């Protein structure tokens, strides 16, 4: 494969194929060394998009979406867009996969088809999150595992530490567990046990952090169970959007504020762009042997473009192979 090839399952999202094709075209205009294989209901795409698609886009018509999201092994036998895209990566016909389809099917399918990395019991969802300092941090798990054991928290901390070195260009990442307080005695038994184990590991573990501080870039890696992580993620997304709406509404109230906004518009735009999670656009599925990116079900064009840029980062930095090499050399701290 001469170009970087991305398999993009575009079935199963909330907004249809239009934002997908627009984002793909825009991405390829700026990144001609990439190729995108769009897999999904091509008839629906042709209904909403009549313009010429980029020469580096291939369309594969796979309109079927799994009929049983609860039976992952059975769903793998179906001729779905997601399964086809996963097989492209498995058979080395694509370097990475993206999908906004069902999270459980995607996680399970990626785990069964591409297999887990050494020393990983449970893969996790891990987005790059914006901060007020202009830097990013890794947050995991944000929904892949609702029930979490202490060993999972330890494993995720260790593997995310390796991802942070490559993705964030930090030689010694700060790693924290998210908790309801910073004191050792606070939290669930699983969190407290993981806390004690991580103190013994050869990473820069800084202890417990409270979620209210993470937007201020207090850590490079923030680890939490999937239930709590999903709540943190959606709360941050909602708070940022609500803050932007609040500013707009307050500006409209008085003429003097509208005039002031004309002078501060650039600053407001910069703040909004810094904290706009759509610029990241997706979560990494870490712990599987592949570059696997999970897009938000309600993604728009900007979100998909952000997700494509995440794949670009992964492939150009050779993130997966570097993480695998590091894991193999350390045996993930002797399997945590």
Image (tube, rainbow, N blue to C red):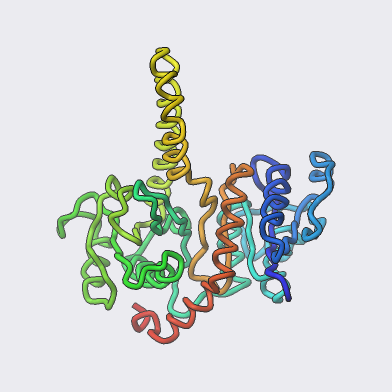
Residue at far front of view: 263
- Residue depicted at x 69% and y 50%: 26
Whether residue 96 is visible here, answered yes or no, is: yes
- Residue depicted at x 61% and y 56%: 308
Tell me if residue 171 comes above or below residue 185 in the rendering: below
- Viewport quadrant of the N terminus: bottom right
Q: Position of residue 250 (x, y in %)?
A: 40, 20
- Residue depicted at x 46% and y 25%: 262
User: Which of the 4 image quarters holds residue 104?
Assistant: bottom right
Whether residue 66 is visible here, answered yes or no, is: no
- Residue depicted at x 40% and y 84%: 331
Tell me if residue 251 comes above or below residue 51 in the rendering: above
Q: Position of residue 43 (x, y in %)?
A: 84, 46
- Residue 122 or residue 213, whichever sits in front: 213
Q: Is residue 253 left or right of residue 35?
A: left
Q: Position of residue 284 (x, y in %)?
A: 51, 61
- Viewport quadrant of the C terminus: bottom left
Q: Position of residue 83 (x, y in %)?
A: 70, 63
Count of numbered badges drawn on the protein = 0
User: Which of the 4 image quarters holds residue 147?
Assistant: bottom left
Tell me if residue 214 comes above or below residue 115 in the rendering: above
- Residue 199 or residue 64, whichever sits in front: 199
User: Which of the 4 image quarters holds residue 74?
Assistant: bottom right
Q: Is residue 221 left or right of residue 316?
A: left
- Residue 95 or residue 23, whichever sits in front: 23
């Amino acid at each position: 494969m001469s170009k970087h090839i991305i398999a993009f399952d575009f079935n199963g999202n909330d907004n249809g194929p239009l934002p997908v094709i627009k984002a793909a075209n825009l991405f390829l205009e700026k990144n001609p060394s990439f190729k995108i294989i769009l897999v999904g209901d091509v008839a629906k795409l042709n209904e909403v998009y009549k313009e010429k698609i980029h020469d580096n886009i291939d369309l594969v018509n796979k309109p079927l979406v799994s009929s049983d999201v609860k039976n992952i092994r059975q769903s793998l036998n179906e001729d779905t867009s997601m399964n086809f895209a996963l097989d492209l990566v498995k058979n080395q016909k694509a370097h990475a996969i993206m999908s906004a389809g069902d999270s459980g099917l995607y996680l399970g399918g990626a785990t069964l088809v591409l297999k887990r990395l050494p020393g990983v019991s449970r893969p996790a969802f891990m987005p790059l999150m914006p901060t007020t300092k202009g830097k990013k941090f890794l947050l995991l798990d944000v929904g892949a595992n609702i029930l979490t054991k202490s060993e999972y928290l330890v494993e995720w901390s260790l593997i995310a530490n390796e991802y942070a070195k490559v993705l964030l260009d930090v030689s010694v990442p700060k790693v924290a567990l998210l908790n309801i307080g910073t004191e050792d005695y606070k939290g669930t038994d699983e969190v407290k046990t993981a806390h004690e184990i991580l103190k013994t590991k050869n990473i820069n573990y800084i202890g417990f952090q409270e979620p209210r501080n993470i937007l201020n870039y207090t850590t490079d890696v923030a680890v939490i169970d999937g239930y709590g992580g999903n709540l943190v993620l959606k709360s941050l997304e909602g708070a940022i959007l609500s803050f932007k709406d609040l500013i707009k509404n307050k500006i409209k109230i008085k003429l003097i504020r509208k005039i002031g906004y004309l002078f501060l518009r650039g600053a407001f735009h910069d703040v909004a762009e810094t904290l706009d999670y759509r610029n990241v656009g997706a979560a990494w599925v870490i712990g599987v042997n592949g570059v696997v990116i999970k897009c938000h079900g309600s993604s728009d064009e900007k979100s998909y473009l952000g997700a494509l840029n995440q794949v670009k980062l992964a492939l150009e930095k050779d993130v997966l192979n570097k993480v695998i090499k590091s894991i193999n050399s350390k045996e993930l701290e002797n399997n945590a």
